[in-house]
Amino acid sequence: MTSSINPRTSLLAAVLVGLSAALLPCREAAADATNDPGTGKRPPVIFMCGDSTMANKPLFPAQPERGWGQLLPLYFKESVRIENLAMNGRSSKSFRDEGRWQPIMDQLQPGDYVIVEFGHNDQKKDDPKRYSDALGTFKQNLERYVREVREKKGLPILATPVTRRAFNGGEVKDTHGDYSVAVRQVATEQKVPLLELHQRSAELVAKLGPERSKSMYMWYEPGEFASLPEGKQDSTHFNAYGASRICDLAVEEISLNVPELAAWLKSRK
């Protein structure tokens, strides 16, 4: 028996094959839409969890306080998304207890980074909601953060807490003590990249000295900002200049200790 080919069926099959071939590059392009055009790789997301020294601060109405994490996006390629979830007043304990850690876990993808910086508020012994013992529960909290990031194939980074502007004569006092020690211990024991912000920031503040270092912190006369009618003398929190100097140090530490992430920094011209 001689089979006959329906011209209409043949034409429809040809159209469908052609359409499928035409759509294939579109599907591939859509899959690659999130890739960095320069490298062809998926850019990482950088999640940040910490306290007020890292956190984003409101810009309006005009007020001078900034967290160093607020400035970090300026250093990275535009394809790198930075999710700064740090929050004023939080400790390694309260950040998790308030449910602020869970959104990071929900969004974290393999190859994403999580920068963790705590210590300032963990020291508050009079506040059981925030306090954690430096070489006890604080260290355990950091170890748990590291473990959970790695379970999702993310890449943890630990940062020692930035210094307070506290002088004893001409020397900068170490107000963090064993909290910085605990961060370093976890970084070493768990083989986690470390951003040594405590030592680096203390060296910077010491170099500036007791008076000039005020320029980095929230030291303002009454009336300088409408949002600070009585002025302020705060040696913990940074203004925009101070946050930028600390962020400079953080980026230098990333360049030294996290070269895979440093590859996503903007090129120097």
Image: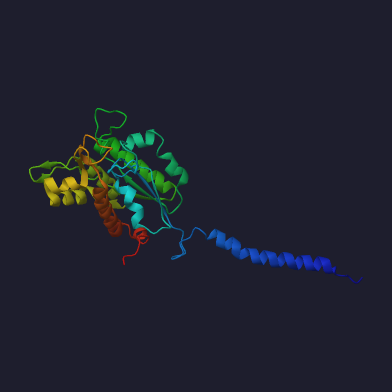
* Quadrant in the picture for the N terminus: bottom right
* Quadrant in the picture for the C terminus: bottom left
Residue 162 x/y as whole percent: 24, 45
Position above or below: 34 against 197: below
Q: Quadrant of residue 260?
A: bottom left
Residue shown at 33% from the left, 35% from the top = 93
Q: Does residue 10 appear left or right of residue 249 in this picture?
A: right
Residue 94 x/y as whole percent: 34, 34
Residue 67 x/y as whole percent: 30, 45
Q: Nearer the viewer, residue 239 or 116?
A: 239
Position above or below: 77 against 133: below
Q: Does residue 89 appear left or right of residue 43 in this picture?
A: left
Residue 15 x/y as whole percent: 74, 66
Residue 191, visible in the rendered structure: no
Q: Nearer the viewer, residue 91 or 53?
A: 53
Q: Nearer the viewer, residue 17 or 78?
A: 78
Identify the residue at the far bottom of this view: 2
Q: Does residue 106 appear left or right of residue 205 in this picture?
A: right
Residue shown at 25% from the left, 34% from the top = 133
